[in-house]
Image (spheres, rainbow, N blue to C red):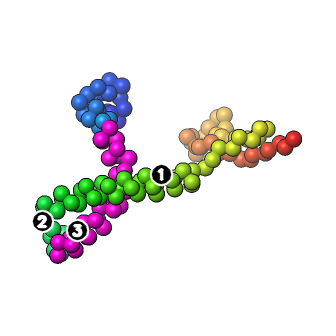
Amino acid sequence: FAATDPEQQQTLIARFFSSKPMVFLGNISMCVYMIHLLVAMLVAQLLGTPHGASPVWALVILVPVSVLLGWILTRFFEKPMAHLLRPRETKDKGTEVIVTGPPQDPSPEVVGAPTRVVAAQTQRE
């Protein structure tokens, strides 16, 4: 929460985490996380060491390969799939949406209850 505080925006740590390299790593982090273990197992197998017993210098191979593959997965799989699966906004004219929410005098059971769409009717010309 401190990073979103307007008074904290110019602090060294806020600027660091807002830098382009950190934002890039944040954007690809899920795919890097998903692929890094497979890369580590492959590197261990190529080096002929049991998994988890690779030398420290193997990180020179593991980290860049994991970041590269994470970026490729993000760019060519995760983002296109998210775009495909994202609900699309309809631009139909004459769409009437009836929305209900908590009653005017909320009881303790419905305080903070989410608003929900009950029905949508489209008028065609």
- Relative vertical location of residue 46 with respect to residue 24 in this rendering, above or below: below
- Residue under the image location 46 percent in, 57 percent down: 77
- Residue under the image location 56 percent in, 40 percent down: 111
Q: Nearer the viewer, residue 116 or 91?
A: 91
Amino acid, disc 2: Pro
Magenta-highlighted residues: 20-48
Residue placed furthest toward the right: 125
Viewport quadrant of the C terminus: top right
Give the crowd class for mark 2: few <14, some 14-19, many >=20 residues within 10 Å.
Answer: few
- Percent of width and height locating residue 63: 24, 56
Give the alpha-carbon distance from disc 3 to disc 1, as whole Å.
27 Å
The residue singled out by tag 3 in the image is: 43
Disc 3 is placed on an element classified as helix
Amino acid, disc 3: Val
Disc 2 is placed on an element classified as loop
- Percent of width and height locating residue 114: 59, 43
Viewport quadrant of the N terminus: top left
Give the alpha-carbon distance from disc 3 to disc 2, as whole Å.
10 Å
The residue singled out by tag 2 in the image is: 55
